[in-house]
């Protein structure tokens, strides 16, 4: 079995899981999901972004919204995902009719798959065509927060991929071409109207162009700005129509300086820390230091984008704005962190550690999506106190496609997903340079996570209360 086949098998497993698993919870689920669904439904049904009328269709609260004195409710988030989702919602509406309590999940699934899953599928396939190894594809698909968020109706995965492709469009060739700068500008501009955090790579990539070769430098910058400018206009127009001011984004979103608490939450806390949830990304940090690209413009732009994006969002870790899984505000830089892994800079790292860090990352990122994924933000050890008991004590599993055909939700409906996830580890192992050492690392990873989840007992009372609230919501 060759390297290319291993990667294709991993992609096939992901495609099946993206269709089979339905972690969508209109009742008591993600408030961010509710807001995005409601905004899209309103745009198609009423040609408006006002969402208060959808409260009759769903049970739950909205996140990141503004309510007017007249009772009108609007999302604070930029309109990109709503606009992009509208055709998929409209197509689904033709088939299932007007939105009702019974068909919310259907339109939700279609939009989630189109916005969250398909971009990751296409991106993984693109990487395979560029001869990226199965280990890198396995990390991309299963071992970072990209995996759970690609199965939810969020914009993070799409924006992260667009930012990375824009980076590659500009800085992949020794000579920077104006036409590629225009394409990058389009990708980044659309990213901005999906997530405001895309402003950081827009600025850093643009500053990088100032240090390119003098010939055609002005044209590069002009083409780059020409690609971005229409989306700035769309964003300003949206804010003017909806909120009364083109600059209302600055009044709606508080600028918070980085804090020690925010740094801890985003990097190393067991509840949200990126390097706890996905310790395999530590390899990326090592690769930044010893990469052969050190000192080159491409490498410098990548590092500054990651650092400044982190600095820009770390203050928000204390105000997550609704349900979240891991450090969702840092997802935008994950493909940039993985770039060194895609390029093979860690191929010579010890196989034992490659297997160990991959397995720990894989388990911590996939386990939450097998059950109710939105652990309360006050829990500090959700894998131990929330998700493990839900899976193994309460037998509370996420919905699957089997449930839509009337099969009772139980361990047998989630078992196919568990088996395929184990097969994903197998196909990554098949690609290892030293299979025995890699297998030892895999075993050590399973033992570590197993001990953390089953033998330790953190915040038992708080975790029990949170689980009971979740179960009660669905009994009601």
Image (tube, rainbow, N blue to C red):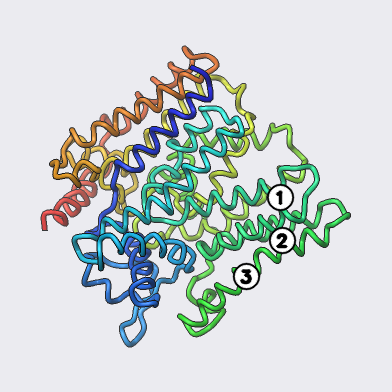
- In the image, is residue 401 above or below residue 362? below
- What residue sits right under mark 3 in the picture? 230
Reading the chain from its start, which is encountered first: label 2 or label 3?
Answer: 2
Q: Residue at x 59, y 68 (%)?
A: 231
- What residue sits right under mark 2 in the picture? 224
Instruction: Determine whether, in the image, residue 287 is placed left or right of residue 110.
Output: right
Q: Residues within 10 Å of mark 3 (few under 14, many from 20)?
A: some
Q: Position of residue 299 (x, y in %)?
A: 71, 42
Q: Position of residue 199 (x, y in %)?
A: 60, 62
Mark pair 3, 1: CA separation: 19 Å
Secondary element under disc 2, as helix, strand or loop, is: helix
Secondary element under disc 3, as helix, strand or loop, is: helix
Do the CB atoms of the residues marked 1 and 2 lie less than 8 Å apart?
Answer: yes
Do the CB atoms of the residues marked 3 and 1 lie less than 8 Å apart?
Answer: no
Q: Residue furthest left?
A: 475
Q: Position of residue 246 (x, y in %)?
A: 56, 80
Q: Residue at x 40, y 22 (%)?
A: 426
The circle on residue 170 is 1
Mark pair 1, 2: CA separation: 10 Å
Reading the chain from its start, which is encountered first: label 3 or label 1?
Answer: 1
Mark pair 2, 3: CA separation: 11 Å
- In the image, is residue 457 above or below residue 197? above
Instruction: Determine whether, in the image, residue 166 is placed left or right of residue 16.
Output: right
Between 157 and 107, the residue placed more toward the observer is: 107
Reading the chain from its start, which is encountered first: label 1 or label 2?
Answer: 1
Q: Residue furthest top?
A: 436
């Amino acid at each position: 079995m060759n390297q290319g086949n291993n990667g294709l098998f991993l992609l096939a497993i992901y495609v099946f899981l993206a269709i089979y698993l339905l972690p969508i919870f209109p009742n008591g689920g993600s408030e961010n999901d509710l807001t995005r669904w409601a905004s899209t439904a309103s745009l198609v049904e009423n040609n408006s972004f006002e969402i208060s009328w959808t409260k009759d269709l769903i049970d739950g609260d909205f996140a990141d919204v503004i309510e007017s004195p007249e009772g009108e409710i609007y999302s604070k988030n930029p309109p990109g995902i709503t606009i992009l989702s509208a055709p998929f919602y409209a197509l689904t509406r033709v088939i299932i009719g007007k939105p009702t309590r019974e068909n919310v999940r259907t339109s939700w699934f279609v939009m989630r798959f189109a916005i969250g899953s398909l971009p990751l599928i296409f991106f993984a396939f693109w990487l395979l065509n560029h001869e990226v190894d199965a280990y890198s594809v396995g990390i991309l698909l299963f071992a970072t927060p990209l995996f759970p968020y690609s199965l939810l109706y969020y914009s993070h995965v799409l924006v992260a991929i667009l930012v990375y492709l824009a980076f590659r469009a500009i800085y992949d060739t020794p000579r920077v071409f104006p036409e590629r700068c225009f394409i990058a500008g389009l990708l980044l501009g659309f990213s901005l109207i999906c997530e405001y955090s895309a402003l950081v790579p827009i600025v850093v990539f643009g500053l990088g162009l100032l240090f390119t070769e003098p010939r055609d430098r002005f044209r590069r910058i002009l083409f780059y700005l020409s690609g971005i400018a229409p989306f700035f206009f769309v964003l300003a127009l949206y804010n003017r129509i909806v909120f009364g001011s083109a600059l209302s984004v600055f009044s709606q979103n508080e600028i918070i300086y980085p804090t020690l608490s925010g740094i801890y939450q985003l990097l190393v806390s067991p509840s949200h820390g990126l390097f706890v949830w996905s310790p395999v990304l530590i390899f990326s940090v090592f690769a930044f230091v010893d990469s052969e690209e050190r000192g080159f413009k491409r490498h410098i732009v990548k590092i500054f984008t990651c650092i400044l994006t982190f600095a820009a969002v770390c203050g928000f870790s204390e105000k997550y704005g609704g349900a979240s899984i891991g450090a969702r505000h840092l997802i935008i830089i994950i493909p940039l962190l993985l770039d060194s892994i895609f390029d093979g800079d860690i191929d010579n790292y010890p196989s034992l550690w490659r297997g160990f860090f991959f397995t720990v990352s894989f388990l911590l990122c996939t386990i939450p999506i097998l059950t109710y994924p939105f652990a309360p933000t006050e829990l500090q050890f959700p894998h131990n106190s929330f998700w493990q008991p839900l899976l193994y004590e309460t037998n509370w599993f996420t919905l699957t496609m089997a449930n839509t055909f009337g099969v009772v939700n139980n361990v047998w409906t989630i078992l196919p997903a568990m088996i395929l996830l184990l097969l994903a580890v197998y196909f990554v192992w098949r690609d290892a340079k030293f299979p025995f050492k890699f297998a030892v690392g895999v075993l050590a990873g399973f033992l570590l996570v197993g001990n953390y989840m089953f033998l330790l007992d953190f915040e038992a009372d708080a975790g029990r209360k949170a689980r009971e609230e979740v179960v009660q919501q669905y009994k009601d």
